Structures are given as C-alpha cells and as structure tokens.
Amino acid sequence: MFKIIKKKVLNPTIFLMDVEAPRVAKRCMPGQFVIVRASEDGERIPLTICDYNREKGTVTIVFQIVGAATEFMAKLEEGDCFKDFVGPLGCASELLSLPLDELKQKKIIFIAGGVGTAPVYPQVKWMHENGIDVDVIVGCKTKDLLILEDEMRAVAGNLYITTDDGSYGRSGMVTQTLKDLYAEGKTYDQCVCIGPMIMMKFAVMLTKELNLPTIVSLNPIMVDGTGMCGACRVTVGDEVKFACVDGPEFDGFKVNFDEAMRRQTLYKTEEGRAYLAAKEGNTHHGGCGQCN
C-alpha cells in the first residue's frame, strides 16, 4: 500500500498528492510517469511524475477529475493509501541526457498548457538545480485553472503566464505569447511543449515556422503502460511508436497529431477498437483484451 502523505487542492477539479513510494522515488527522473490504482477494483490511471523527494521517499502526482476513478481519488485524504503505484515508466526527458556544458549553451523555452504544467515543472526544476536558466510559458483558459504558479516562478528564468480570457497575465493562447517573445527579439534553440494534444499540434505548427526544434510529451490513452496493449500507439515520422515505452517524449515535427487525436476518440468505444484492430493489423497489438 502507498500512503498519501500530503494532499493539496489546486482548484476545484485538480489535486496534488505526495505519495509514499520509496522505490519509485529512488529511480524516477523528470519526464517519466506512474500508473496508479486507488482500490482493488479501480481503474489504472497513468499520471506524470510532477516531483519527487528521494530522501523522504515520496513522489508527487497531480491529477484532474475527468471520470469516476479520478473522482474517487479526489476523495482520498492524507493517511489513505493507493492500492497500486507502479513506476517509473516511460523514458526520462531526452534533454537530461545531454552534457551540462551543452545544455548551458542552449536557449530553451518550455510551454505548458493546463495540467501539462505538472510534467513541465520537474524538468524546469532539474534545469534550475543544474544551473540552467530556461524560459517558461504557462497557459490556461482562465486564472482559476492556473496551477503551480509559485513553484514554477521559483525555478524558471522567466515565467510568462497567459490566459485565454485575459483574466490573468497575458491574453491569448500560448502560441501568441511565443510569437510576441520573438517579436520582442527573443529566440530559442529548443522548445519543450506539454499540454492538451490540440495545443501541442498548434504550437508545433508555429515552431516549425520559427525553425525551432520542439519536443512534445504525448498523453494518449494508456491501459497497461508497458507496451502490451497498443492503446497509446502513435505515428512518429514513418514509424509506429508506443508512448508508454518509446516516449512519452517525441520529436514534435514528426508526430501525426491528427491521427493521434482520431485514434484517441475511436479507442473509447468497442466499435472504434474493432475498427482500429482491422485497420492496423499486426501492428495493432491488442494485448489489452478490449479488442475481441
């Protein structure tokens, strides 16, 4: 059992929890994720690791209520336990594998959309701890949905907040803020963009115009998190990849976002899964047991 050490309500639908999971905390790195199960018969929920404390043996997760399983999780309190807390899964951020001297020469901007702020934060924190200043754009629909502002401000070189409705910070989408920064004379060597699929799609359309290499972190439907089920299949360039084991980070210029979004919608229904199984043939996998 994995005890909840801390619970914080970030807004009415988004929650932060520090969970006692020493083996995960010992090995995890920014960019990776865990799969949690709140009860014996609960749904498996993939969540990006938002932070970790190796000394205390805790891992921080952030989740949004989107269904019955996450609503149940939101009712858990400090002292309650998760039935399963599996990880770390996926690959660490590829930037972390570069030599520090090389990273310090790069001008890097992170773009976070909505709950995507949670997976951006540990990467920016790691950069800060290693003496690398990066700029960060955080976007959300309205001020009430903004999360981790103080935490991000403490580790970002420059933090730009933008809201769709103009209720806080700059007004407009994250793409408009990036355009504005370039118009003000800023340029970057690398972009990391994490958020809703549609946001990442339009951000990449812009960064292609700017000739700004962009890493995206994909969050398609996942069932087992080990590459068996095929639910998180995506096309990157001309190759079939699975976000849970090959990612979650990929070259944004190569991701087929339209296909990924269509597939996410289709995978939610029995008819859609049958269609995908017929269309994808031997590359479909289907180990989740949902397809037949």
Image: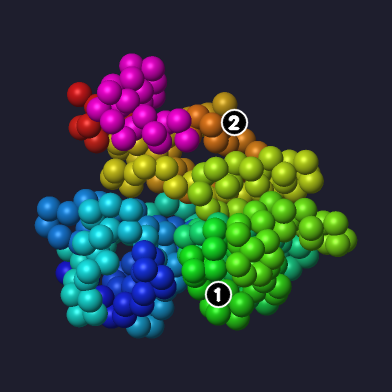
Say which quarter of the image contains residue 80. Answer: bottom left
Q: Secondary structure at mark 2?
A: loop
Horizontal side of residue 152 vs 26, given as left or right: right
Q: Which residue is mark 2?
A: 237
Q: Position of residue 25 (x, y in %)?
A: 37, 71
| Along the viewing direction, whichever of 61 and 75 lies nearer the viewer | 75
Query: Which secondary structure type mostly characterizes the magenta part of the structure?
Result: helix
Q: Is residue 235 above or below residue 26?
A: above
Residue occupying the point 39% across, 34% down = 265
- Density class for disc 1 (Cα within 10 Å; few <14, some 14-19, many ≥20) is few
| Along the viewing direction, whichever of 205 and 247 lies nearer the viewer | 205
Q: Position of residue 143 (x, y in %)?
A: 54, 68
Say which quarter of the image contains residue 95. Answer: bottom right
Q: Which residue is mark 1?
A: 149
- The region drawn magenta spans 261-284
Q: Secondary structure at mark 1?
A: helix
Q: Count all numbered tags in the image, as a single digit.
A: 2
